[in-house]
Image (spheres, rainbow, N blue to C red):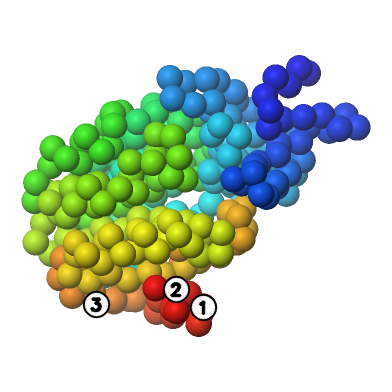
């Protein structure tokens, strides 16, 4: 098999994916098989079958989610904000092409409408077909796929959504604009008066500058902002952060997540995820 990508190589007959983190850290995965490999208009989209993490979505050589631990990220970015909003009906997901977030939000019967805005249609198609452990082969009639730029889409909406979930990749390339203050301002305007937004805000250990920047910008725009964490093994450093911004008071109701058929999130996780390590509290 010819491997013409800088992040794929062969050693002793084995295929290896090597992920480069800002030139300072390299993480390598032994790969069983290349399930899907196609170049979209935006990026190189691959579904790889790895030995330890099962099937994984890889964009431009960077692991986005896996069948073994993808549920942790998707459940935490979905169910935690759902435990805060008392009666969400309309939800916007920006990004989230693997469909894992939409799958989690759709577990709530009271949700009437989910807009999922993903710039790269190929990511959605590949994930639904080849990554069912994450996507659940999503086919919920309440989910509306919109394949366009998330920044422009959000800027066109005013007072429309109860909850907005920003499931972005790293702040490079197409996702860079999803970390700008002007985008957070658009999110604020697109939310209803009691609306909530949440975004992934990178690693507290390796990307603390991005995390603090996101937290500061959201704090300046929303009535309340709060950061919480989860451990996602395939993400650099393991510990990952999420930041919530609310237009009203932030009150958590852990009972909202009960009986939702989750693998990671439960009432205790929702209660405790806002308890931060000492170093992280000092950073903020």
- Give the residue drawn at x 19%, y 52%: 185
Residue 51 placement, left or right of 71: right
Is residue 284 visible in the rendered structure shown here? yes
Of helix, strand and loop, which one carries label 2? helix
Task: Name the quarter where the N terminus is drawn.
Answer: top right
Q: x and y percent of residue 139 in the render?
A: 36, 37
How many neighbours does mark 2 have within 10 angstroms: few (below 14), some (14-19), or many (20 or more)?
few
Q: x and y percent of residue 110 in the render?
A: 21, 57
The residue most toward the right is: 12
Query: Label 2 belongs to which residue?
Result: 283
Query: Label 1 belongs to which residue?
Result: 279
Query: Label 3 belongs to which residue?
Result: 251
For discs 3 and 1, the disc positioned in front in the rendered view: 1
- Report the disc number at residue 22: none
- Give the residue drawn at x 39%, y 39%: 175
Disc on the earlier residue, 3 or 2:
3
How many neighbours does mark 1 have within 10 angstroms: few (below 14), some (14-19), or many (20 or more)?
few
Are the residues at dot 2 and dot 1 in contact (C-beta closer than 8 Å)? yes
Of helix, strand and loop, which one carries label 1? helix
Residue 163 placement, left or right of 210: left
Q: x and y percent of residue 226 in the render?
A: 32, 71
- Give the residue drawn at x 64%, y 44%: 23
How many neighbours does mark 3 have within 10 angstroms: few (below 14), some (14-19), or many (20 or more)?
few
Quadrant in which residue 163 is drawn: bottom left
- Give the residue drawn at x 91%, y 32%: 12
User: CA separation, marks 3 and 2?
Assistant: 23 Å
């Amino acid at each position: 098999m010819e491997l013409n990508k800088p992040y794929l190589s062969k050693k002793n007959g084995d295929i290896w994916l090597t992920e480069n983190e800002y030139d300072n850290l390299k993480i390598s995965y032994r790969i069983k098989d290349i399930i899907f490999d196609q170049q979209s208009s935006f990026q190189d989209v691959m579904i790889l079958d790895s030995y330890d993490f099962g099937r994984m979505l890889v964009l431009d050589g960077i692991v986005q989610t896996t069948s073994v631990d993808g549920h942790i990220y998707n459940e935490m970015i979905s169910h935690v904000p759902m435990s805060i909003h008392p009666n969400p009906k309309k939800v916007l997901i920006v990004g989230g092409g693997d469909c894992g977030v939409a799958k989690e939000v759709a577990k709530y019967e009271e949700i009437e409408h989910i807009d999922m805005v993903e710039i790269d249609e190929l990511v959605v198609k590949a994930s639904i077909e080849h990554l069912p452990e994450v996507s659940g082969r999503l086919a919920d009639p309440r989910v509306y796929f919109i394949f366009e730029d998330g920044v422009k889409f959000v800027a066109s909406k005013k007072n429309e959504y109860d909850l907005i979930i920003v499931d972005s990749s790293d702040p490079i390339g197409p996702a860079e604009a999803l970390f700008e203050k002007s985008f957070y301002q658009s999110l604020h305007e697109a939310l209803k008066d009691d609306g909530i937004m949440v975004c992934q805000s990178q690693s507290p250990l390796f990307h603390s500058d991005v995390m603090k920047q996101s937290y500061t910008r959201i704090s300046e725009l929303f009535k309340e902002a709060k950061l919480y964490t989860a451990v996602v093994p395939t993400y650099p450093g393991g510990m990952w952060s999420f930041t919530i911004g609310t237009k009203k008071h932030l009150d958590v109701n852990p009972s909202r997540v009960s009986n939702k058929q989750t693998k990671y999130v439960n009432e205790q996780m929702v209660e405790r995820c806002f308890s931060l390590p000492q170093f992280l509290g000092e950073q903020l």
